[in-house]
Structure formats: structure tokens, C-alpha cells
Amino acid sequence: MGIWVRRLDMAIPTSNYIFLPWARQGAASGIRALDMSAEQTGVVSVTVKLRINDATDVDRQVRLYGPGDVIGIDPQQVVRTEPRHMTMDFEPNYFPAIEFDRPDFPWLFTPAAADAAGRFNTGWQYRSPRVRSWVRSSSVRLS
């Protein structure tokens, strides 16, 4: 067992982690329909360009998976749950939570682009772009 001493004359570097739920990767970065807009649909297609060697480019519309295509969640995606399974003494004023392996999992199948104006983030000091989550968590009391 060691003793930790904090020296006051040393500058302690600070670091921050900021999660950007609107940052999309892969084919989802090509989604252009804004969330809650008139052109948003439940299914989204993006244009992909295919080039093989030096041949002419081929453009195709590709349908992406959306929330309606999900029929289950791989248990390996769930890192931790609160309360843990079969917990009988979970405090009623605590909020249940699920931690996923992929930090972007709740937004992975949202068929919309982020709203750059941040209009769905009213009441916050920092108005950043947002994408609504496609998955919801609910808790039910067993009688």
C-alpha cells in the first residue's frame, strides 16, 4: 500500500472527454435528411460510388438499416447495466442505465442527420447539433 502525495508546485494537466453523438461514420455520414424535418423518412438511402481499378465509377442508391430492422441487441454490446441482473435492493430514486460497448450505439440506426442549429437542445447553454436516439430504455415495477 502506497501513499499518494500531491505536489502543489506541479502543474496538473487537465483533460476532457467530449462525446459527439452527431458525429457519424461510414455510410451513415452520407445521410442528409435532418431530424424531425419534412423529408425525413423511416428508411434512408444514400448514394455510394463504386470504382474497380481504372473502370468508370458506378453510382448506386443503397438502403441503410433503420430502427425497424433491428430485431435484437447482441449481448456482447452491453458492457454494464444498473441495476445488475436479479438485484433486489436497488434504490428506487436511482436511475437505471445501460452502458454499451459502442458509445454511438443509441444513435447508430437513427435515419436522420444532425440538426446543425441544435434546435432540439433548448434550455442548455451550449446549443450543439443533436440526433435523436433510436432506442429507448424503460423500467417497469413488477407487482
Image: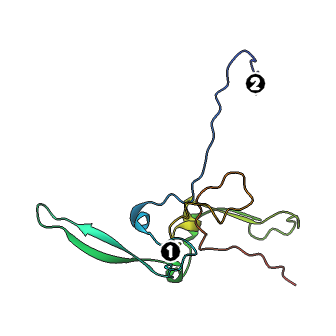
> On screen, 61 above or below 4?
below
Nearer to us of marks 1 and 2 is 1
For the question of whether residue 76 can be seen, the reply is no
Density class for disc 2 (Cα within 10 Å; few <14, some 14-19, many ≥20) is few
Mark 2 or mark 1, which is nearer the start of the sequence? 2
Residue closer to the observer: 70 or 20: 20
For residue 66, side relative to residue 48 (left or right): right
Q: Quadrant of the N terminus?
A: top right
How many marks are shown on the rendered structure?
2
Query: Which x, y percent locates residue 111?
Result: 50, 74
Residue at (50% x, 67% y) in the render: 113
- Expressed as whole percent of the image width and height from the top left, the position of residue 116 reads 55, 60
- For residue 35, above or below residue 54: below
Q: Whole-percent x and y of residue 60?
A: 27, 75
- Mark 1, residue position: 111
The amino acid type found where label 1 is placed reads Pro
Where is residue 32, by image quadrant? bottom left
How would you rate the neighbour count of disc 1 (Cα within 10 Å): few for under 14, some for 14-19, many for 20 or more?
many
Q: Amino acid at mark 2?
A: Trp
Q: Which mark is residue 4?
A: 2
Whole-number angstrom distance, CA of label 1 to CA of label 2: 49 Å
77, above or below 66, in the image? above
